Amino acid sequence: MNNVQFGRIDFDKLTKIYKRQYNHHKVSAALANYGFFSQGLLANNESVDFIAHHHSGPPQLSILLKSRLTLASHLEHQNLSIAFYERGYWYVYPHDDVLAFACQTSAITNTTSWQQQGLYTFPQLTDKYRQFLKPWRL
């Protein structure tokens, strides 16, 4: 007989590695509702946290976990999807498509963050981005 007692965890008390694994499993569970099944990576690859395969074959998603909407010049042209959680939903968006939209509709490339680091993150989604990201909301 197994004497395991289940109790909810406090996400904020997890280590960075366990937070990453926790989020991997949470977004994987959401993706499963759409026929995607994930496979974690054994090697610590900086630009991919896990791969999600569709049950019927292609497409395959290479997914990077982030804590919010993130755009980065070093992630361009890598066929990456970024996953983040906001207000009860997981978003799994194609990085390059959202970057193109942001460059066309805002001035993110003029920010200090973009010019110095090639990086821009959104502390919270605006209505414009929430609407644009809707096709990739789980």
Image (spheres, helix red, strand yellow):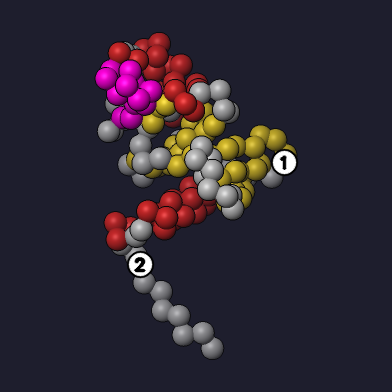
Q: Residue at x 40, y 40 (%)?
A: 66
Give left or right: position of 114 versus 33: left
Around disc 2, counting alpha carbons within 10 Å, would you say few (fewer than 14), some (14 to 19), or many (20 or more)? few
Q: Magenta region: which residues?
A: 111-122
The residue at the far right in this view is 57
Q: Which mark is residue 56?
A: 1
Q: Residue at x 65, y 43 (%)?
A: 53
Residue 29: percent from left, percent from top: 52, 52
Q: Is residue 50 above or below residue 82?
A: below
| Front residue of 133 and 115 | 115
Q: Quadrant of residue 109?
A: top left
Q: Please tell me the numbered disc located at residue 8.
A: 2
Cα distance between the residues tagged 2 and 1: 34 Å
Mark 1 residue element:
loop
Tag 2 secondary structure: loop
**Image quadrant where residue 126 sits:** top left
